Amino acid sequence: MRFNSAALLTATIVAIVAGFSAPAPADAGERLDRIVAEKRIRLGVRADAPPFAAIRDGKATGFSVDLCRQVAVAAMAATGLDALDATVVPVETQDRFKAIEEGRIDILCGAATATLKRREIVSFSLPIFSTGVSAVVAADAPDLLKEILVTVGPAASSEAAIAEAFRDKTVGVRANTTAADWLSHGPLVKLDAVTIREVENHAAGLAAVASGEMAAYFADKAILLGVLRQTPPAGKPLVLSAASFTREPYALALPRSDEDLRLVVDRALSRLYRDGSILKLYERHFGKPSSEVLLFYTMIALPE
């Protein structure tokens, strides 16, 4: 696929991929019907979620974006099309699921955690990645705070130690994320002397920690790693927690009412998982996969 620098970036798939061939659904869902009729699939991409989804120099990149490209090829083959336009539509964190519900995009290619609450308005594919909420603090942060958030030592199990570590501290999180939901119901909200501040993007949160404005910033660990590698903030050196405090299963978000489109997506993902292609893609974005990663994709793949 080739993307130009227009606001809505368009790519045309022209290859015929026999490996993804499958009978066309007898009664395709409404969204899949539209995709076939228009020969166009709209992929929603966040600009600020590396290494899963980002837009750099007018080009959509990332692990989830590459997966969506593979899915688009599979959709073309499964529906008997000889070509399919894959239009990349930039979306924001706060409107990404609404964009699916309203029909502005067909698949969300980003870093979206599949949750039951979100399934009230959208559907999800098979899991594509597993991570969890983590924290970043300054390298010169107080030892007690680092023991609780970075090394997760014995103090992390003590309510008194947690209260002391966060006394008169401000911590940050991005709005409209599962990390924000977790913080709003977690142990920190019970503390009177801690302030939880929502920020517009991850870069702003990390910059606030590097400048000393915030004591810690919470987000999904995989995203924190990606942002720190690509655009480390100026200021104090930062350290990332060795542990995750939640489990965040990422998936591609889809229209809630179209099981036929979901079947096309899940079939494509399962084949990538079974034949090992996913491991090459994983290594391109995250480095050599561990045995745990191999087991994850082996267990997730569905048989035909």
Image: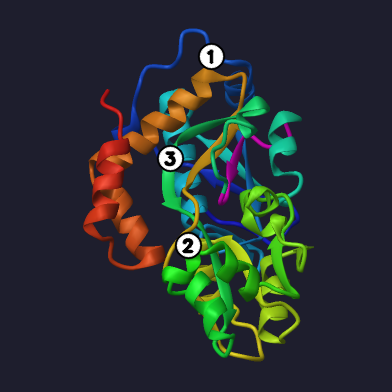
Q: Amino acid at mark 2?
A: Ser
Point out the tag, 1 or 2, that comes first from the N-terminus: 1
User: Is the residue under label 2 in contact with that under label 3 (CB below 8 Å)?
Assistant: no
- Mark 3 vs mark 2: give the one in front: 2
Q: Amino acid at mark 3?
A: Pro
> In the picture, which quadrant includes the C terminus?
top left
The residue at which mark 3 appears reads as 127
Label 3 to label 2, Cα distance in Å? Answer: 31 Å
Point out the tag, 3 or 2, that comes first from the N-terminus: 3
- Mark 1 vs mark 2: give the one in front: 2
The residue at which mark 1 appears reads as 28
Q: Position of residue 198 (x, y in %)?
A: 77, 61
Q: Residues within 10 Å of mark 1 (few under 14, many from 20)?
A: some
Total marks shown come to 3
User: Is the residue under label 2 in contact with that under label 1 (CB below 8 Å)?
Assistant: no
Tell me the SS state at disc 1: loop
Q: Residue at x 66, y 72 (%)?
A: 166
Q: Residue at x 70, y 69 (%)?
A: 171
Above or below, 203 relative to 106? below
Question: Residue 157 got which mark?
Answer: 2
Please check the rendered image and state whether residue 107 is part of the magenta-colored stretch, yes or no: yes
